Amino acid sequence: MHRQINAWVEGQSGWARPLGEKVQHALGDLFATRRPIKNLLNGTWFGHPVHPAVTDVPVGAMTMAALFDVTGHDAPADIAVATGLAGMAAAAATGAADAVDAYGRPQVLATVHATCMVAAFGAYTGSMLLRLGPRRGRPLARALSFAGYAAMTAGSYVGGDLTYRTGNQVDRHAFDTGGSKWKALDVNEVPADRLTRAKLGNETLVLYRATDGEPIQALHATCAHAGGPLDKGTVIDGCVQCPWHQSRFRLLDGQVVQGPAVYDQPAYDVRVTPEGGLEARRSAGAH
């Protein structure tokens, strides 16, 4: 069954891709001058995406609302729906901040996911309005809630695919093992004030020194957010900025200082060998 569902979702790209691009453009303009708000919604300050944590609120609340409706407990059901609507609004804000940086297949899935959730929000809003009115509207209010729950469940399914199948918002270094042994780099010189790409075995690093004679700073060159090439980025205030989505990482220790990234970048120690070459190893305590 899951194959048929996935095929159906993939088949929505005809409308989801252009719609997603239009919404993404609008959101990009909205967040362009509001970077601190976007960082807050992404979870840069939290070291973890905020959206998946927030989504538990409406899912839990609406599940309780359904149970209360089935068992005839009207007042608790109304409170649960109101709570769920507030949670859905918060989830929409955090999801929008994440979706603005999604492209290709993740963008299509994000658009289908968001469409299902907007439909659910509309159904629950109608249900809430009926619950506030005369009691004769209660049967329709319950029916709308059940319809909203179905749409929310479908949206949650697609949202799960967005994360688990495409790796959206997953740390690109989640499976890196690192290592404490010194290994030779394939470069012997790092020009001052220039990002330098280097290979450490199978790993690609970005090296930097502000002036000649200063210690060399090194980070993994693959951005933890979406895999962007940090060696093609820019240096701003002691940080390297990813060219793809403008995440920034402190060159000193890899700490993320600007989203949409939420995970720190692996940092490396670099030393000069007696023969004049360069060696590096993962910094102690680095992710």
Image (cartoon, rainbow, N blue to C red):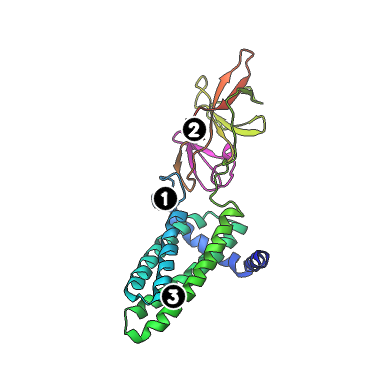
Mark 1 or 3, nearer chain start: 1
- What residue would you read off at disc 3? 145
Along the horizontal axis of the image, is 137 left or right of 171? left
Question: Which percent across, then down, holds residue 108?
Answer: 59, 62
Quadrant of the image occupied by residue 201:
top right
Seen from the viewer's position, the closer of residues 152 and 67 is: 67
In the picture as drawn, the residue positioned furthest to the front comes out as 71
State the residue position of label 2.
251
Label 3: state its secondary structure: helix
Magenta range is: 224-251
> Magenta stretch: residue 237 in it?
yes
Asked if 161 appears above or below 188 in the picture, the reply is: below
The residue carrying mark 1 is 35
Determine if residue 193 is in view.
yes
Report the amino acid beneath label 1: Arg
Left/right placement of residue 171 relative to residue 13 reads: left
Task: Give the residue drawn at x 61%, y 21%.
Answer: 278
Q: Which residue is drawn at 36% across and 66% down?
A: 83
Tell me, yes or no, whether the highlighted magenta stretch contains residue 199: no
Q: In this view, does 192 lie above or below 123?
A: above
Toward the viewer: 249 or 72?
72
Q: Are marks 2 and 3 in contact (CB under 8 Å)?
A: no
**Residue 277 locus on image (x, y percent):** 63, 19
User: Helix, strand or loop at disc 2?
Assistant: loop
Kind of residue at disc 2: Leu
> Could you tell me which residue is drawn at 54 percent across and 46 percent down?
225
